Structure formats: structure tokens, C-alpha cells
Amino acid sequence: MRARGRLGLLGTAVVLALAGCIPETRLQPRPDARSLTEDPTAAVAEAQGVRLIADGAAWEGHPRNLERRLTPVELRVENHSGRTLSIRYALFALVGESRFHYAALSPLLMQEANEAGPTCIAGYVPRRSWSLGATWGPRRGWRYPGRPWWPNPYYDPFYDPFYGPQHDVRCEEPLPTQEMLDRALPEGTLENGGTVAGFLYFQGVGNRERQVILQARLVDASTGEPFGELSIPFQVRRD
């Protein structure tokens, strides 16, 4: 279990490190989705007595640029199945045209992955290749092919040792923010007749997809038995 936890944490850290390259994206219901009349950015699906409402354009909290790093989707789950319903992040996914499954990230794992603080990116290419075959990474130092990094103990994200001080430096706030934690969909058990709502934070879909399908697997919390699936199709809108 400990090894699996480390792998999950490593995977989350990699996702967050790559997220800075994702354009700001929002999801809007596809024409064939069942949209809500009172909210055109939300869509609904029902099966086996479970109703799922999803809004891929609802995030207006802090950070304001969250859609450049992740894909937040607000969910409301209403359970009238006659069973207790399991609510787990692993039961939700965005499936793209590429058939890649984008996972819902645990806010707690995100928090652990970013304990080191904000990521600062200077306004120059962070790694430079030279004729000697060495690669320069200002945070990590030098690396020669086939050898480990030679650490740079004097790393300063505001200074390039070759070109002097850098003023175009962007520092990303660590995720999740407190507001993301407060508004996250809680995991647990949803009793028959109950309702739960909150945000899921998926891996960013903006780089690869034009359309995605939100999938939710229905699992009986008492027996672990799957008893259905809900799907909502979305278009990916880039701003």
C-alpha cells in the first residue's frame, strides 16, 4: 500500500508540473447532451435512480487561472437508487477522442505533492544544450548525458547565470488552494435519498482534446457491486 501511495503521489506531481503548458479551457455540453434549461453550461444524465449534473464552466474561484492547469468540473449527485452509493474520485474520468482517460485528482495528494512551495519559471528556456553535451537546468544544476544532475546550491529563479537578472518570472501558486479544498466533491458514502455536490479537478484536457465524455461508474457502497454508468459528452472550448 505504501508503494502504491508513493506512485500516486509521483504521478500527481508530474501532472502538476506539466500543467503549466495547458491553455485555458472550459467544457460546454455537446449538442447531443441533455442540457439544463436554466443553466446552458450544465448537462445531466440519469441511470438506475442516480442523477448526475455536471458543469464544466462553473469555476470562478481562486486561483482564477485554474483552467490553465487543470480541468475543474462541478458535480451534483442525487441518489434515489435504493442503494448506498460510493463516491470515489477513482470512479470518475474524462475520456477524450484520443481514448486517453483523464483522472480526477485527489486534492489531498495534490497538497502533498506541492509541499515544496510555488514553482517559479523564468522568462527563458530553463534548460540549454551546449556543444559539450551538457544540459543546464537552473533549479537543478548541470547534467551530462548518462550522468545524474550536479545540483546547483545557488539557484535563484530570478537570475540567469548566462544572461543576468530575469524580470519576466512567473510563479505558480501551489495547488490545491484553500478554496479548491473547501469546494471539492467529498468522497464517502451517499445514502439513498441523499445529495452531494462539489468540484472534481481533472488532469488538463486542453492540449489534446476537442471533445471529452465525463464518465461516472455507479458502485454499491455496501457490496462493492457495480450497477451502472453515467456519461455526459462535452466540447472543449479554448479561451
Image (cartoon, grey):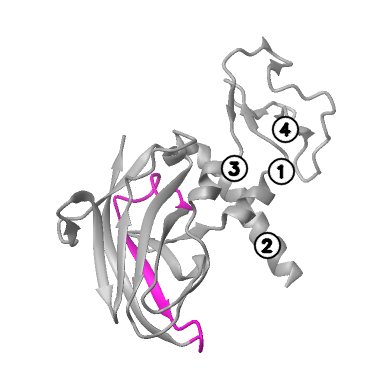
Range of magenta residues? 202-224
Earlier sequence position, callout 4 versus callout 3: 3
Element type at marker 4? loop
Question: Three-letter amino acid code at disc 1?
Answer: Glu
Residue 71 point in image, percent of width and height = 42, 48
Q: How many marks?
A: 4
Element type at marker 1? loop
Earlier sequence position, callout 4 versus callout 1: 1
Residue occupied by mark 3: 17
Give the camera-side residue of 202 and 196: 196
Earlier sequence position, callout 4 versus callout 2: 2
Residue 190 point in image, percent of width and height = 45, 73
Residue occupied by mark 1: 115
Left or right side of 134 for 53: left
The crowd level at tag 1 (other Cα within 10 Å; few <14, some 14-19, many 20+) is few
Between the residue at mark 3 and the residue at mark 1, the CA separation in whole angstroms equals: 13 Å
Which residue: 14% across, 54% down?
Answer: 37
Which circle marks residue 32 in the picture? none
Vertical position of residue 227 compared to residue 32: above or below:
below
Give the camera-side residue of 1 and 38: 38
Between the residue at mark 4 and the residue at mark 2, the CA separation in whole angstroms equals: 31 Å
Element type at marker 3? helix
* Quarter of the image where the C terminus is located: top left
Residue occupied by mark 2: 7
Left or right side of 192 for 109: right
Q: Residue furthest top?
A: 164
Between disc 4 and disc 1, the foreground one is 1
Residue occupied by mark 4: 133
